[in-house]
Amino acid sequence: MTAALIAEGAGDTVAPAARRSWAWLGLLPFFGFIGLFLVVPAISVFTKSLVDADGNFGFDALTNAFTGDNRDAFAFSIKLSALSALIGVVIGGLLAYAAATARRPKFLRSLVTAFSGVAANLGGIPLAFMFVALLGRQGLGTKLLDGLGYDLYGSGFQLDTIWGFATVYSYFNIPLMVLITLPAIDGLQTSWREACANLGGTSLTYWRRVGLPVLAPSLLGGYLLLFANSFSAFATASAMTQQSAIVPLRIQFYFRGDISSGQEQLGFSLAAWMIIIMIVCMGIYWMLRKRAERWQA
Amino acid sequence: MIPTSADDQLVVLEEELEPSSTPTVSGALEPVGRQRRRTSRIGPTIVLVACALFFVLPMVATARFALQNVPMVNLGWSTVFDRWTLRPILDVLGEDQFRTTVVLSLKLACLTVLFTQLLLLPTTLWVHLRLPKVRPLIEFLTVLPYVIPPIALVAGILVIKPSVPWFLNSDYSLIPFYAVLALPFTYRALDAGIGALDVKTLVDASRSLGAGWGTTLARVMIPNLRSAIVASSFLTATVVLGEYTIASVLLKETFPTFMAQYGEGHGQGGMALALLALLATTALLALLTILTRRRGVAAQSATVF
């Protein structure tokens, strides 16, 4: 790859028009890489869900993805992601605000951002184990709460219920929200608050009429991003439950071992729907993001 | 320092490098009376303390759980800090599978880093030098992995598996897919690093002194981009060392799949592995922060957004 690039750069003396057409060649390795290892697999998912084993084209598999257990999985996944995203946006937003406005320990803000950078990437198996250690049936937190007279599991909590998942997902959702809202909070100008006060507005007026409307695109965008983040989480969930209650786990259910379940087309349909949902969420996210940047120059 | 992130969705890891961004909001509280300010700090303090607990307690619990020597039934207030043991960690370290999976994961991490740098460094440089117009397109392509989650990507890989079994049967076939997963992080880190340099002038200077393209790349670009390269390499490594989805569906035995499998049979052993993974990840990212800080260039993104 490097060799191709260097060899091509040697053609410096070529006329400008010709050089431009040559310059594209330098991107071939990259385009080939993206094509082979990302676009081809993604498109295969769609072709597999549209064409059945006999080679007939149809939308049956895509619609069948919304029946029976799979429909339940979609309903649960959407509810779970909506709840996790809401928790992440509210707590992450408050945490970002608290970190941005705190002035006493000078290192607080950098501590919060540095830690968020680590925790936002902490998903996966270790995260699931950490919460089993804390809130599992034999977990330390469970036992200690019991010692205080509070029976956590007696109150209906379980790690593989919606609240359990949402608690664990918050561990990476909250830091992600902190990272994406900090710039937006920094964009709030002192002068706006002063102007608001001069016009007789209270703190409440300021937030209702100025602060929140300015932050709204960031918060909404953050909500979609966290929704997508929770919706696609696989590793963490798979270590927390034996059932296939959420969509990513349903997909894996069809492909366990090697393809042979005879129903793999359903698995591909679920994957296709998942990509569609991600495209919608991320698409709106990028649009909102552009809007939010207006105040962050 | 790079004129960051208004338009490229970078989140800078080390905000203290940009002191200018901090005071804006704290200043917002200035005109308010002293008494008022004190009461308004109570809410944020509660939020900060509660969040600190939420993030630290699972780590503490994991450490205690992994290293405890008290029968699980007796675990409670009276025995919280009682007896300790390194047994679970030593047991895990003695497992053959532990060694083989860690070695495989480390190899994959190194090779993915190498693959990514060989592919992305020339591409990104090339785009900055010759094709600035296609930057938005490249940027769009590099965030695509976010739209196609690993579990959907691996479903697609299973489709093509029958056509290229010789490739996908090898453990090393994971490398390009891991490079894809890390792409949003790596591209942004390199792109920001290159954007902070006056690449054109550097290249012209080097060329006019008689250096060929190879020399320019090796002796001018790479030394100047050291922290961007280090940052993107570390981020790639953390992605590879923690990736579970693709490896587990393709039945590869990497460190994360070993952890999941071992944890099912050995509760404490699983916690010990989680603790090791946690420490390794934190160490990697802390090292990254230190390395890039010494260079005096803003540290690169820990997330794409």
Image (cartoon, coloured by chain):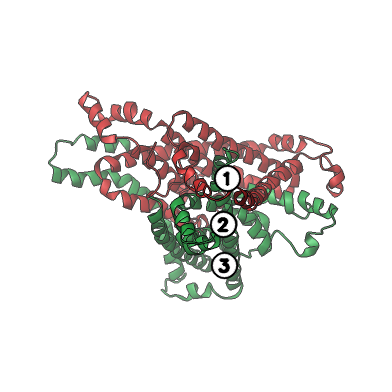
Chain colours: A green, B red
- How far, Cα to Cα, is label 3 from label 2? 12 Å
Q: Secondary structure at mark 3?
A: helix
Mark 3 or 1: in front is 1
State the residue at coordinates (52%, 60%).
Answer: A207
- Residue A297: percent from left, percent from top: 38, 50
Q: Quadrant of the rendered structure where residue A14 is?
A: top left
- Please tell me which residue lies in front, A234 or B300: B300
Q: Which mark identifies residue A102?
A: 1
Q: Which mark identifies residue A233?
A: 2
- Residue B39: percent from left, percent from top: 64, 52
State the residue at coordinates (61%, 72%).
Answer: A72
What amino acid is found at the position of numbered circle 1 in the picture?
A: Ala
Subunit ID for the residue under disc 2 = A
Subunit ID for the residue under disc 1 = A
Q: Is residue A187 visible?
A: no
First in residue order: circle 3 vs circle 1 = 3
First in residue order: circle 3 vs circle 2 = 3
- Residue picked out by circle 3: A78
Subunit ID for the residue under disc 3 = A
What amino acid is found at the position of numbered circle 3 in the picture?
A: Ile
Numbered circles on residues, count: 3
Q: Which mark identifies residue B113?
A: none
